[in-house]
Amino acid sequence: MENSSSSANSFNDGYTQMENPICRCRKVTTMAKSWTDENPGRKFYKCDTHGFLCWADKEKPFGWQKISLLEARDQIRQQKEQLKELNESLRACNDKDLNGADSGMMNLEMFEKIAEEKRKLEIEAMASKEKEKLLRQFIVISWGGFIVVTAMILTMAKK
Ligand SMILES: [Zn+2]
């Protein structure tokens, strides 16, 4: 038992392309590692087309080794997920920062422009308000004059 497992290990360690079994389609298989619940960490040969051919590790993982392999697998998966989340949030954060800086600069420029426009408009508005006031007074006066003249004509015509 001890001998067979050590010879299996030395077989795996001395693995070369030539030692891989050949699939029924005559392609040389490649070695891969299984991470299923049933066979965590167990090496096997697979064909690119047909998939699983046979186990490279003759013995199934079992006992505490299997459990620790499953735990390691789950831990790695979890860490990968966490890393992915971290990367995503970091990217989102960077995007937000960049956008914030961009819009901040734009806002400042726009604010200055708007402030300038507003100042111009205020000056114009003040000027036009004055003009409007004068114009209104003029209209009132002329309308008043027109009405008075019309009234006078009308009353004169009545007589
Ligand atoms: Zn094949």
Image: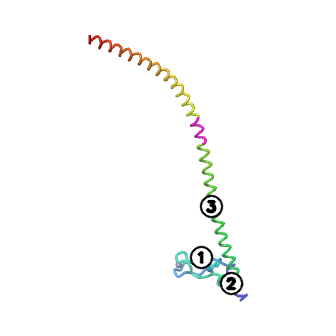
Q: Which residues are magenta?
A: 104-111
Q: Residues within 10 Å of mark 1 (few under 14, many from 20)?
A: some
Check the image and report above or below for 106 versus 97: above
> Is residue 106 part of the magenta span, yes or no?
yes
Q: In the rendering, at what x and y percent does residue 88 appear?
A: 61, 58
Residue at the spot 53% in from the left edge and 80% down from the top edge = 26
Which quadrant of the view contains residue 102?
top right
Q: Quadrant of the C terminus?
A: top left
Disc sitting over residue 85 in the figure: 3
Which quadrant of the view contains residue 30?
bottom right
> First in sequence: mark 1 or mark 2?
2
Q: Mark 2 = which residue?
A: 8
The reply, left or right, for residue 25 in relation to residue 33 is left
Which quadrant of the view contains residue 105?
top right
Give amino acid for label 2. Answer: Ala
Report how far apart the C-alphas of labels 1 and 2 lie in the structure: 17 Å
Which residue occupies the foreground of this view, 90 or 145?
145
Task: Tell me the mark number nearer the camera, choosing from 1 and 3.
Answer: 3
The reply, left or right, for residue 51 in relation to residue 135 is right
Q: Mark 1 = which residue?
A: 30
Magenta span: chief secondary structure:
helix
Give amino acid for label 1. Answer: Thr
Residue at the spot 62% in from the left edge and 61% down from the top edge = 85
Q: Quadrant of the N terminus?
A: bottom right
SS label for mark 1: strand
